[in-house]
């Protein structure tokens, strides 16, 4: 009945930064259960997240590290935590067009406020149950890939080509 | 999934009276428990957020939890207003969702680039608009947590 909402039919790539292996499994299974055709990729901390996005280190082959449409970000991670990673992504002209949604155990007001202050596009407290996580996965898919318009990597590449030193999109 | 404790206050900036009416009706269809306030351009939007001029009484202009922003408006357009909100330390924590008729990739990219939390193309039908507002409400009211701060109108 409404073509406006359903015309984004490209495969949906989500990149999740999460240091806890159990939580990675939970997120992966919840997205599988949500019934959407997601390509879900994982990194384990903020350092890996930035390396993935900048195609550095073990993420140099584009096929194994495609540009995500959406980033899910845990806050408490070793090496570089989610707060620092979010600040770095939002300060990078090539990366900051990718929406970042925080998914965390924290329910501290300071974390919520800081997430939005730094440019986060949502703050979700990790549900305690699998069913809850499936609901979140469904809600994320519905909002970000049916209601919202996202930027295409190719377009950003065209526009930013001349004024950025490092290349996210090759 | 925990709901935000207090009802979410939306503020919409749109210069077209027909669009404002449609949005209001779409809200009534889908988000009855939340309130929506309207301003007509970017100048009014910033006045509202800074409690200036005709918005100096906080009761008439409660701090919004989320801003819905049209791009093409007279006086100060959505792009300028967005840039101004996102460079103001006391306002930039408020998520701004662009809601516009434009489907231009350049508008989409530029909106995210200057700090929009999302970009929604206005559906052409009323049913489509109700669906979009329902989806918007589901995400921002039911799924995510928003900061609890600012002045309240309670």
Image: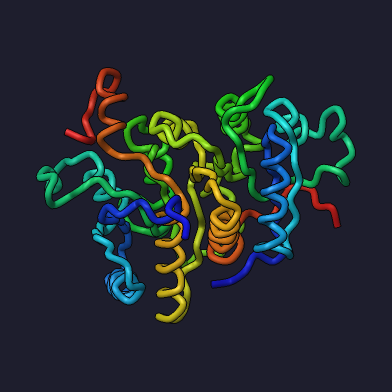
Percent x, y for residue A90? 42, 38
Quadrant location of residue B26?
bottom right
**Vertical position of residue A20 compared to residue B67: above or below:** below
Percent x, y for residue A161? 25, 23
Question: At x 30% / y 56%, what residue is drawn?
Answer: A14
Quadrant location of residue A137?
bottom left
**Vertical position of residue B54 compared to residue A80: above or below:** above
Given residues A165 and A5, the one toward you in this image is A5
Quadrant location of residue A74?
bottom left
Question: At x 32% / y 32%, what residue is drawn?
Answer: A94
Q: How many marks?
A: 0
- Quarter holding the C terminus of chain A is top left
Question: At x 72% / y 64%, what residue is drawn?
Answer: B32
Lateral position of residue A68 relative to residue B25, left or right = left
**Vertical position of residue B106 compared to residue A12: above or below:** above
Percent x, y for residue A101? 44, 54
The colour scheme applied to this rendered structure is rainbow
Is residue A140 in view from this perspective?
Answer: yes
Question: At x 81% / y 34%, what residue is drawn?
Answer: B51
Lateral position of residue B96 relative to residue A89, left or right = right
**Vertical position of residue A20 compared to residue A79: above or below:** below
Given residues B120 and A1, the one toward you in this image is A1
Percent x, y for residue B146? 61, 56
């Amino acid at each position: 009945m409404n073509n406006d909402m359903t015309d984004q039919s490209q495969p949906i790539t989500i990149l999740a930064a999460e240091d806890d292996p159990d939580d990675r499994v939970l997120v992966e299974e919840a997205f599988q259960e949500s019934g959407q055709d997601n390509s879900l990729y994982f990194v384990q901390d903020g350092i890996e997240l930035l390396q993935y996005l900048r195609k550095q280190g073990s993420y140099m082959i584009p096929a194994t590290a495609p540009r995500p449409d959406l980033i899910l970000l845990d806050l408490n991670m070793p090496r570089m935590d989610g707060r620092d990673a979010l600040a770095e992504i939002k300060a990078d002209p090539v990366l900051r067009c990718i929406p970042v949604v925080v998914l965390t155990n924290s329910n501290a007001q300071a974390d919520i406020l800081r997430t939005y202050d730094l440019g986060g596009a949502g703050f979700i407290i990790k549900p305690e149950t699998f069913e809850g996580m499936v609901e979140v996965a469904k809600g994320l898919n519905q909002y970000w890939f049916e209601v919202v318009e996202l930027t295409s990597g190719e377009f950003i590449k065209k526009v930013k080509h001349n004024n950025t030193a490092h290349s996210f999109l090759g | 999934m925990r709901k935000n404790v207090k009802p979410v206050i939306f503020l919409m900036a749109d210069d077209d009276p027909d669009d404002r009416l449609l949005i209001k009706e779409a809200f009534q269809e889908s988000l009855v428990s939340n309130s929506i306030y309207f301003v007509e351009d970017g100048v009014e939007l910033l006045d509202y957020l800074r409690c200036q001029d005709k918005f100096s009484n906080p009761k008439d202009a409660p701090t919004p939890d989320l801003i819905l922003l049209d791009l093409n408006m007279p006086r100060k357009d959505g792009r300028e207003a967005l840039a101004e909100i996102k460079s103001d330390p006391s306002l930039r924590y408020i998520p701004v969702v662009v809601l516009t008729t434009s489907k231009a990739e350049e508008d989409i990219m530029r909106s995210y680039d200057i700090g929009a939390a999302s970009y929604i193309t206005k559906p052409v039908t009323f049913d489509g608009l109700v669906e979009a507002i329902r989806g918007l409400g589901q995400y921002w009211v039911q799924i995510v947590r928003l900061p609890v701060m600012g002045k309240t109108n309670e």
